[in-house]
Amino acid sequence: MDNHPFKMPFTPVTNYVTIVFLLMVLVGMWINDDTRISLITGIVFLGMVMISFYAFGIGKKHV
């Protein structure tokens, strides 16, 4: 990857800044009464997807 033509400037720092920004958006959604239900619904949906992924063995190779 050292010779890759499309490098992100400030590579390790920009990843952490983006994660902090997304966490701030989630906190803002929790504070706002109008978007709190969407946040909770999204978290529940992601939890259901994760549970079904492991429960049904999706992605595992069956030989």
Image: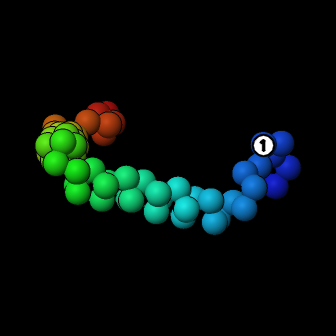
Of the pair 51 and 62, the residue shown nearer to us: 51
Residue type for callout 1? Phe
Of the pair 14 and 38, the residue shown nearer to us: 38
What x and y, as percent, mark residue 54? 20, 46
Q: Measuring 38% from the left and 59% from the top, which residue is drawn there? A: 23
Q: In this view, does 19 lie to the left or right of 3?
A: left
Report the residue marked by disc 1: 6
Q: Measuring 62% from the left and 59% from the top, which residue is drawn there? A: 14
What x and y, as percent, mark residue 6? 78, 43
Q: In which quarter of the image is residue 42?
A: top left
Residue 29 can be seen in this image: yes
Of the pair 2 and 37, the residue shown nearer to us: 37
Q: In this view, does 41 lie to the left or right of 27?
A: left
Q: Is residue 58 above or below residue 11?
A: above
> How many callouts does the rendering have?
1
Q: Measuring 77% from the left and 49% from the top, which residue is drawn there? A: 7
Coloring basis for residues = rainbow
Q: Measuring 23% from the left and 57% from the top, which residue is drawn there? A: 31
Of the pair 60 and 52, the residue shown nearer to us: 52
Q: Is mark 1 on a helix, strand or loop?
A: loop
Q: Is residue 38 left or right of residue 19?
A: left
Q: In this view, does 44 lie to the left or right of 12?
A: left
What x and y, as percent, mark residue 10? 72, 62
Label 1: few (<14), some (14–19) or many (≥20) C-alpha neighbours in 10 Å:
few
> The C terminus lies in which quarter of the figure?
top left
Residue 57 can be seen in this image: no
